[in-house]
Image: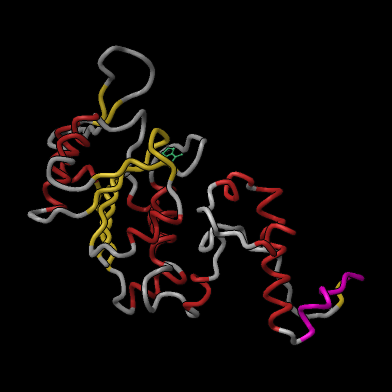
């Protein structure tokens, strides 16, 4: 997969080259190119923003600069363009799974009040465009959102995670939150590991894990339970 990120703060994306993602880049599983938006400015100040039509606080990112940047980075291809914005629809694991099947993703990081809407409307005539939000809070710009989304996508690519089963057993993969997990020692500060996990009875362990996942989801994210497709919960699940 090839990933391009366009930003006015290329250094902000440096963590992409660390740890698991860095290894995936070194092994050639992902190619990541970070582009400085100011490359496509033509004035001495390298201005990327201007005051908003209609007035109001803040600045808006200029369409000319973004237009040229997207033309140059996308070329004749029509990669999926992702624009992080608090005004987008919520980013979910389902998006990460869907995007992980793409050959190429381009991320456009906005700052200030956002990017002139015509940039997005113009791009949408040539490529699929998605405006997505990390959550109901406002960040200073799209860069941290891109780090998050790229990590969520990259760990799903074959050969990136050490253990591919980890991705399959994630929170959200079955629509539920994952329950608690434990490792050695057997007793820590007087707190024992639940007996069933040391029983060797795999059916009982699976049942226990499912029950804890249901319980946790019920308390923390009842919206997820309500959104499960009809028939997902068994009669046994419902007793829980
Ligand atoms: N940019 C600023 N806030 C954001 C958010 N919540 N999600 C995605 N991009 C953003």
Was residue 78 drawn as part of the magenta stretch in this picture? Answer: no
**Residue at 38% across, 79% down:** 159
**Residue 96 left/right relative to 163:** left
**Residue 135 left/right relative to 239:** left
Give x and y (percent) for residue 34.
28, 56
The part of the chain drawn in magenta is: 189-199
**Residue 127 left/right relative to 192:** left
**Residue at 73% across, 73% down:** 182
Was residue 190 drawn as part of the magenta stretch in this picture? Answer: yes
| Residue sitting farthest toward the right | 190
Q: Nearer the viewer, residue 78 or 19?
A: 78
Q: Nearer the viewer, residue 205 or 7?
A: 205
Q: Quadrant of the N terminus?
A: bottom left
Give x and y (percent) for residue 39.
18, 46
Please determine whether, in this image, residue 127 is positioned above or below residue 47. below
Q: Quadrant of residue 191?
A: bottom right
Q: Quadrant of the C terminus?
A: bottom right
Give x and y (percent) for residue 137.
52, 35
Q: Quadrant of residue 151?
A: bottom left
**Residue at 36% across, 28% down:** 113
> How many numbered markers are drawn?
0
**Residue at 69% across, 57% down:** 238
Give x and y (percent) for residue 91.
43, 47
| Residue sitting farthest toward the top | 54
| Residue sitting farthest toward the bottom | 200
Colour setting: secondary structure
Q: Nearer the viewer, residue 4 or 164?
A: 164
Ligand 1 positioned in quadrant:
top left
């Amino acid at each position: 997969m090839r990933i391009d990120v366009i930003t006015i703060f290329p250094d902000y994306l440096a963590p992409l080259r660390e740890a698991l993602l860095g290894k995936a880049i070194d092994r050639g599983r992902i190619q990541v190119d970070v582009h400085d938006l100011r490359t496509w400015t033509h004035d001495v100040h390298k201005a990327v923003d201007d005051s908003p039509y209609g007035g109001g606080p803040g600045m808006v990112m200029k369409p000319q600069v973004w237009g040229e940047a997207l033309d140059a980075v996308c070329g004749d291809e029509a990669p999926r363009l992702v624009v992080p914005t608090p005004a987008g629809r919520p980013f979910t694991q389902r998006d990460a799974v869907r995007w992980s099947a793409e050959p190429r993703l381009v991320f456009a990081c906005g700052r200030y009040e956002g990017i002139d809407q015509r940039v997005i409307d113009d791009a949408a005539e040539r490529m699929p465009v998605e405006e997505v939000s990390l959550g109901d809070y406002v960040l200073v710009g799209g860069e941290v959102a891109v780090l998050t989304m790229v990590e969520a996508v990259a760990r799903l690519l074959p050969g990136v995670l050490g253990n591919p089963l980890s991705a399959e057993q994630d929170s959200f993969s079955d629509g539920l939150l994952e329950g608690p997990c434990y490792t050695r020692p057997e007793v820590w500060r007087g707190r024992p590991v639940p007996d069933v996990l040391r029983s060797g009875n795999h059916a009982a362990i699976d049942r226990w894990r499912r029950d804890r996942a249901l319980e946790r989801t019920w308390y923390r994210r009842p919206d997820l339970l309500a959104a499960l497709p009809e028939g997902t919960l068994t009669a046994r699940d419902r007793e829980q």
